[in-house]
Amino acid sequence: MATVTRREFLKVGVAGAGAVAATGLGFDIAVAESTRVKQNLRIAGAKELHSICPYCAVGCSLVAYTRQKSNGTTELLQIEGDPDSPVNEGRLCPKGATAMQLAISPRRVESPQYRASGATGWKSVSWDFVLDKIANNVKASRDASFITTDGNGSTVNRCEGIAFAGGAAFSSEEGYFATKLMRALGLVHLEQQARV
Amino acid sequence: MTNHWRDIRHADLILINGANPAEAHPVGFQWFMRAKLDRGAKLIHADPRFTRTSAVADMYLRIRTGSDVAYFGGLINHVLQNNLFHDEYVRNYTNASFVVKDGYAFSDGLFSGYDPDKRTYNIATWAYESNARTGYASRDLTLQHPRSVFQLMKAHYSRYTPEVVSSITGIPVDDFKKVADLVGQMGKPDKVMTIVYAVGLTHHTTGGQLIRSGAVLQLLLGNMGRPGGGMNAERGHANIQGNTDHAISWELLPGYLRIPAPGQKTIADYVAASAPKKSDPHSWNFFGTNYSKFMVSTLKGWYGDAANKDNEFAFNFVPKPAQNSSWMSIFDQALKGKMEGLILSGMTAASIGPDSNQVRQALGNLKWLVVMDPLPTTSSEFWHAPGVDASQVKTEVFMLPTTHWIEKDGSFTNSGRWAQWKDQVLPPEGQARHDHWILADVFQRVKKLYQSQGGKFPDPINSLTFAYKDPAKPELDEIAKEINGKDLATGKQMTSFANLKDDGTTTTGDWIYTGSYLDTGNLMKRRQGIQDPKANDPTGMGFYPNWAWSWPLNRRVMYNRASADLDGKPWDPARPGIAWDGSKWVGDVPDYPATMNPRDPNAYLPFIMNGEGVGRLFSNGMVDGPFPEHYEPVESPVANPLHPNNSASPVAFLYDKAAGRPNRFGTPQEFPYIATSYRLTEHEHYVTQHVPHLVQLQPKPFVEIPYELASQKGIKSGDQVRVSSKRGKVEVLALVTKRLGPMTVAGQKVYQIGIPIHWGYVGVSADSDPSHGRYWLANALTPFVGDANARTPEFKAFLVNLEKM
């Protein structure tokens, strides 16, 4: 294949509107040239932050661009692969490339929801309401299922009636913290996605 | 992974089993392609289904799901029978020369010590013969002793001839021989092979042994510890590695310390039962020697002043489980009415299964269920799923909106053990709260309840360290610092786990992360990557030591002492891991004392974490045998060609049977087809059902049906079909394909059906369907049984029937 210099490449484009199909570029360079002055990068002046893809465990680095809006909220403008990463070198798969749709979603749960035993619908409730109820449940189930000494007279100090599972989607530090708290409560049923 | 993503480009041969990296880990797969394109590496893909990975492989082998022990066993046999192993490595770096006790035996599918009533082994005979003079294991470096590991192994795998391998796996004999020829060349010191796998190996009743069979092959070829080598697990969630390391796992404490067992009263009891024991005079046994230091420093970190010498550092605060308490055990206990509450954070039991219908029944048996997630899940909504009468479900359910990964900082550890820090990009959306703030808040409220009302053993709750600026809102930066650990006398951050002590003067949260957060700062934030390869990759091997941080001690290839020979020279100078320069080890962070001369008469053996000091071809660390053996899945269309009397795993735990519940396993007469489950590129487990772009790319659930079988049944692509197992059914679209096909197993023609897992009754797809995905849960089909060792469910091999609707 013949090599084309950038200058020649532009000349082909400027040669006329009919060159679009011939160059196979899918856009008309002449038009692109004439409108360049009006364009601004969507991320111009944005804050550049670093994240990691939330899906599989390749650990692709992401660059996220945000801008503070006049009403004080933060707008997420763009997520793309981080070109500096020795893992992904800027590349992303379809999941990573659509990470913005996971980050910002109209499908998010808006407030704590509660469904009483036998109820047929959710009730929106306050954080205080759910946290108090859960704390009372944890204490009641822990007290009801706590084994201090087993049948052989061994001290075992375990809570058999509460299980915690999760952690493949949150930060390591949150996971460590969950382990620390759940073991302090005496939980033995502790699990995450490693097996499943 | 023993190695890391970028390292795969160093391989000469890549065996891919139980994985489809081109589709499930597409960006990681670039390093496989670099190996192929840049150095002419060969890719061999053994998988039930021809995928995009197969499309670029040099050889594709249609293998029956769950038969990989036979495949690797056949390769082991080829290497042993033809003396193709790496001789110097096998003699000096593995336990091939160790002599096994008299009494060890294997016959008709059973190892010595089997108890058929308990379905367990007494492993007393799976041990080394003790040398009367030294007290350590007897060794025969000529490898000729009839009870040497080498000779026992050779006899064990002599049964795995190409014909037997073909009969079990369905791989044609000629194809298998071609692979064996390629693999056999990888025992040369200047060649290296990697084995890459994913949950296609782990999700079986023999999952642990499937992986061990690959590891044994890698040790024989001298490929463990080397750049371009190793056993590399591709993990499927962003932080599954990090939170396995941090022990959200019933049998572990942080850093792979064992959870204590009933009967252990002191740290000494615990260490005696848990730590590896030195079995050779030249073994360092680093892990075993330091086990008590890691444990005491962890307890000191958790319980502060309440942990001291006089109370065994609060050893009695740590719960001691009576029995297996893993994933399936949680639901087994719930079915028995013994589990009151379940907290799910970012995972959905109803979709995950196995045996989703039984799991949903278990959820309905709970008193209360807490779901913490940014988005609704099939667990938060199980009580009003299609076909369920909500008024009959007694469980009290809480749905707590949590923040997404991008609304908080903290680290994710990838498959290659690289802990990479991320920024908080956005503030929490609406009322969403961080998972750890919810847990901190609940914990503080529980603590207040104990202080006001009293209750069972509140001591660990009252004395748990909470040294955060705001105890209800700990910062992840504060926790990262805590995980690293500190010297209590000086207040300085620990720089290495080698300096941890068992006298209560040091702390750690997870010893394998010690060194990640120093007084100079958080090393997981480092960003010196490929923007300047010359400066940032000084060895040229792609370690990038100042990009993020990897455990342990920023080492990029584990067991790297084994990458060099007895003199410390790299086996392949073109691909060094570490090398002895006459006064110190250079290259990667050495998995060995930094200045230990390898020719010193007292030099340690290379595998410093094992009691043996060498890699274990034979191990008593598994409950189902010291050598990997092929067993059929619990549901299989054929009897095991090797030992039909003991066809399936003799020690896999059968939950339903043990609990007295009705049998939920099907027979080949009712369910004649093999099924396996998997992911698609466009979805990740179940969360992406909420991502419109990805739902547009893969909108509807389907099953993949081999063309020949579909023709027999008059099924065309796009037809609605019902796939059923003894446990449940899915009703979805048919995709007829030649990427699956008939195979001959044990002289019988069998078909495999492929089932993507991603759909359920929650999400964009479900919203658009009038039946709301009532029969879309793939795991309605999967059996409630798992690996004999890890209890990993058998998601990947089970029997189904297929009907056109």
Image: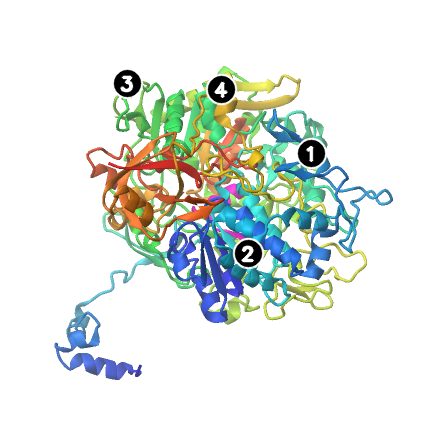
Q: Amino acid at mark 3?
A: Ser
A29 and B686: which is toward the camera: B686
**Which residue is pictured at 59% across the width and 23% down the height?**
A157
Give the total number of marks visible in the rendering: 4
Which residue is more in the foreground, B653 or B169?
Answer: B169
Please tell me which of labels 1 and 4 falls first in the chain.
Answer: 1
The residue wearing badge 3 is: B391
The answer to whether the residues at label 1 and label 2 have Cβ atoms under 8 Å apart is no
Amino acid, disc 2:
Asn
Q: CA distance from mark 3 to mark 1?
A: 49 Å
The segment highlighted magenta reads B231-246
Give the class, few, some or many, for how many residues have Cα within 10 Å of label 2's Cα (few <14, many ≥20). Answer: many
Evaluate whether label 4 is on the same chain as label 3: yes
Residue shown at 66% from the left, 65% from the top: B579
- B176 inside magenta stretch: no
The nearer-to-camera label among 2 and 4 is: 4
Q: Which residue is disc 2 drawn over?
A: B3
Q: Helix, strand, or loop for circle 4?
A: loop
Give how far apart the Cα atoms at labels 1 and 4 are.
32 Å
Q: Residue under mark 3: which chain is it in?
A: B
- Residue beneath disc 4: B660
Dot 1 falls on a residue whose secondary structure is helix
Q: Which residue is mark 1?
A: B273
Helix, strand or loop at label 3? It is helix
- Point out the tag, 2 or 4, that comes first from the N-terminus: 2
